[in-house]
Image (cartoon, coloured by chain):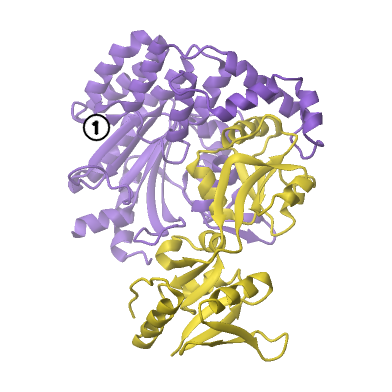
Chain colours: A yellow, B purple
Amino acid sequence: MSLKIGVPSKGRLMEKTFDWFGARGVTMQRTGAEREYSGAVEGIEGVELVMLSAGEIPRELAAGRIHLGVTGSDLVRDKLADWNKQVAELAPLGFGHADLILAVPACWIDVDTLDDLDGAAAAFRARHGFRLRIATKYHRLVRDFLTENGIADYQLVDSQGATEGTVKNLTAEAIADITSTGETLRANHLKILNDAVIHRSQATLFLARKADWGTAEQATLAALAARLGISAPQVSG
Amino acid sequence: MTISPAARAEAAALFAAFRAAGAAAVEADILQPAGTLLDLYGEDIRARAYVTQDPLRGEMVLRPDFTVPVVQAHMAGGAEPARYTYMGEVFRKQDHLGPRANEYLQVGFEVFDRNAPEADAEVFAIFAGLLAPLGLRALTGDIGILLAAIEGLSTTDRRKAALRRHVWRPRRFRALLDRFTGRAPMSEGRARLLDHLKTDTPEALMDAAGPQIGLRSAEDIADRARALIEDAEAAPISAPEAAVLYDLLGLAAPADHALHHLRGIQPLMPAIAPAVDRFEARLRALQSRGIDTATLPFAASHGRTTLEYYDGFVFTFHRDGSGAVDAAEPPIASGGRYDALTAILGAGRSIPAVGGIIRPALVAELKGA
């Protein structure tokens, strides 16, 4: 059996992942026809490349169908309960930076912080008869963060895209989303709360604790870790 | 996790005992409409209950507990006073790997009766009696005393409402209290915000900040901006009153001793007197049912981290370990008074209610050990 490593199948995330491994003497490339999702690894024996959607990599890691995987640290934390018992973080890769933040309309002159959001939510619910809606696709991360900070009288509404537009479209009062420069937020007349960075995400190499770690895979992991200059945790077969 | 035959047998025995105590058996659907529960508990319930979609009935949840459907059934047609018992599976998502079950049996007993101290004592005593052979440790509390102390503060209604709203979130409650009593300095962020809000009218500041978008109206925003300025000018909660609240938060003692202590601090905040009277009446009622209140553990903050519907007497029964209660292990039994919940579900009509549940699987496990 070979050691399977899942990497994003397209776009900048794929290119940067290939660059990161390439700089450390492990060459990854796509093979076959232009639109075919298959790849190969050179420079180390026994490693198989699995091209996957970045959003599916957490699930594949949790199921142990891949041994290693590259995806955003936000996705792993959001999609996996008890994420650090299911996977281990081997190395932050230094790209794909994005912050998961809370944002409210810029015209909310009375709201700068989480504390204000909580106060605004209480007043909103009393006046409008329902809980203040926060649009997001990061349900677990956002809910855990708001619970930890004791925020009440809100509800999460699911938004899988164009989240910044939900406030103007009257389907949410506030949003929790990923941003790197904040430009889209400003263009949609939103401002970031001062104290509500929920998670600073970046592309990260993860190890699946539940994968089949036979002697061969353990040896390959040790060789790969040495090549990449990282330390790998003890895994058991 | 499969429910064991031993747990089913234990459930049946407890159910029979509650019926023998005068309770009518009630059933509740396993699939419950999500709307009521989501509105009551918010996102907490989404994290804890299995929410699913029905093509005709919309969002549904797998029954996370019986209390809400039993209250609804009683409100719809039950006569007073009433005693109910139920037995069945409940479903709770577990967000951590570990032994906690996500599907288990509950057997419950609920009393709808306007004689509150007697009903509290009746429920506790029947639970204590049924669980007596297991040598469990009981813990009791009374959220009503804390709520009465908040009501009794000589401060703005807005501050009282903020404290009342966060009684069930102890960390946030503490932060608010520290701010309102002047123990914690105003945060830099709030100071900056207030400085900005004082530079012009809310309307002018909103115009400068950006276009009006979303359902939260200019009026909502301006009202809160003015409220923030008003609040900053309000005097801090006085030192003696603050002392009473901080004292209450930390009060943990055997029940009789706690009563003595509460009578001692009562002159500092006379508004808690009716709540302390109720506490005393409950202790008398417990004594008359054979409960030793000289040793019964009491903590004024007990029950503040559970679902926010208990607003008076609360109790739990735990495996008697040496040392503190293991947070990872659920109580064998728990319950309390939830008058406010009946008021919300009754749309104006309310009836005092108290009840609790036992987890028969844990009882069976203890008996087997």
Give coordinates of residue A59: x percent, y percent: 53, 71
Q: Which residue is mark 1?
A: B297
User: Is residue B125 visible to us here?
Assistant: no
Q: Using the image as rendered, state which of residue A169 and residue B366 is in the foreground.
A: A169
Asked if residue A137 is positioned above or below residue A54 in the image, the reply reads above
Q: How many numbered callouts?
A: 1
State which quarter of the image contains the C terminus of chain A: bottom left
Residue nearest the observer in this picture, B107 or B27: B107
Q: Secondary structure at mark 1?
A: strand
Q: Residues within 10 Å of mark 1 (few under 14, many from 20)?
A: some
The residue located at (66%, 53%) in the rendering is: A179
Using residue A91 as the reference point, say whether residue B5 is left or right of it.
left
Q: Residue B361: x, y in percent? A: 31, 57
Residue displayed at 61% across by 84% down: A29
**Quadrant including the N terminus of chain A:** bottom left
In terms of image quadrants, where is residue B10? Answer: bottom left
Kind of residue sitting beneath label 1? Pro
Spot occupied by residue A170 in the image (x, y as percentages of width and height): 77, 44
Residue A198 appearing in the image: yes
- Residue extending furthest top? B267
Which quadrant of the structure image shows residue B83? Answer: top left
| Depicted B134 relative to depicted B242: above or below | below
Question: The numbered mark 1 sits on a residue in which chain?
Answer: B
Residue B299, position in %: x, y? 30, 30
